[in-house]
Amino acid sequence: MPTLLLAVVLIAAVAVATIASVQVLREYERAVVFRLGRLLQPPRGPGMVLLIPVIDRMIRVDLRTVALEVPPQDVITRDNVPVTVTAVVYFRVVHPSAAVVQVENYTEAASQIAQTTLRSVLGQHSLDELLAERDQVNSQLQAIIDKQTEPWGVKVSVVEVKDVELPQTMQRAIARGAEAERERRAKIISAAGEYEAAEKLGQAADIIAMSPIALQLRYLQTLLEVASSQNTTTILPVPMELLRPFSEGAGSGPRLRTGNGHAPAD
């Protein structure tokens, strides 16, 4: 009986050891194996991995891209404007052995590097650059963070500044500035329109001055437009050019004479 019990225990132990020694890795996973504390190269996987019980120790490493959200950071820009910035960092492990051996927790380390780099880089830019040149700022952040995480076997592919939160006073100041800019543009457009209209009217006046008949035709057209309206009272302006022939005829007519036959003195 004791012999049978011992055999059962041995068989169970062998089965458990066999099950523990066989590991299955997915396509996006790699196994970093330590044998008696020494790193085995290269990393194992994907598929089935055989381990020596008690002697081998395996650490799974995920190779998929991770979206790491950076906590809100209080930043003072180059032009002394306090802002609160949030960002997201996309990275993935490209060298599993380095990600395990070179750093204790590569996710936490990448987060800390992203926070310090975010405050440092954004502090070198003005508020206008931060709002208008977002792509350049993102590229600069990505290059700096990727260079710092490269020894860890971590590749930073994208860094995006998600939101830039301004103080309420600064938001009102920017709104006033934008409104003033819109008013300035509206006045410039209005002045340009008036200048163009005055220029066209001057050209029209020159044309009419060269052809007096054109003024009469324009006057007749105006009369036609006025006659078609519903007004009960119509005021007809008479241009001086139409009265000029009468004034000239009156000036050239016979002069009055006095009773003694002499013309009156001027």
Image (cartoon, helix red, strand yellow):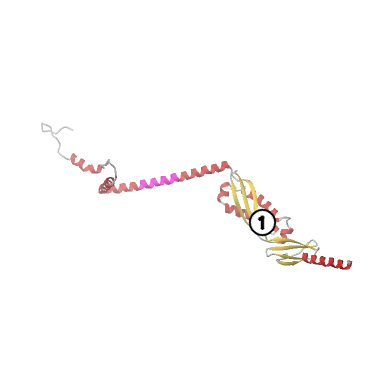
> Residue furthest toward the right?
2
- Magenta range is 186-199
Left or right position of 256 against 90: left
Crowding at label 1, few (<14), some or many (≥20) Cα neighbours within 10 Å? few
- Secondary structure mostly taken by the magenta-highlighted segment of the chain: helix
Q: Nearer the viewer, residue 145 or 90?
A: 90
**Residue drawn 43% across and 46% down?**
189
Front in this rendered view, residue 117 or 219? 219
In which quadrant is the C terminus drawn?
Answer: top left
Residue 157's spot in the image, x, y percent? Answer: 63, 58
Let me know if residue 86 is in the magenta part: no
In the rendered view, does 180 fall on the left or right side of 92? left
Q: Position of residue 154 (x, y in %)?
A: 68, 58
Label 1 SS: helix
Residue drawn at 23 percent across, 43 percent down: 242
Q: Going by the image, does 218 lie left or right of 139?
A: left
- Residue visible at 34% across and 46% down? 201
Q: Of residues 76 and 17, which is closer to you in this image?
A: 17
Q: Is residue 12 above or below residue 208?
A: below
Residue 135 place in picture, x, y as percent:
57, 54
Identify which residue, 206 or 192, lies in the foreground.
Answer: 192
Q: Is residue 197 magenta?
A: yes
Horizontal and vertical percent position of residue 245:
21, 43
Q: Label 1 belongs to which residue?
A: 147
In the orientation shown, which residue stands out farthest toward the top?
A: 260
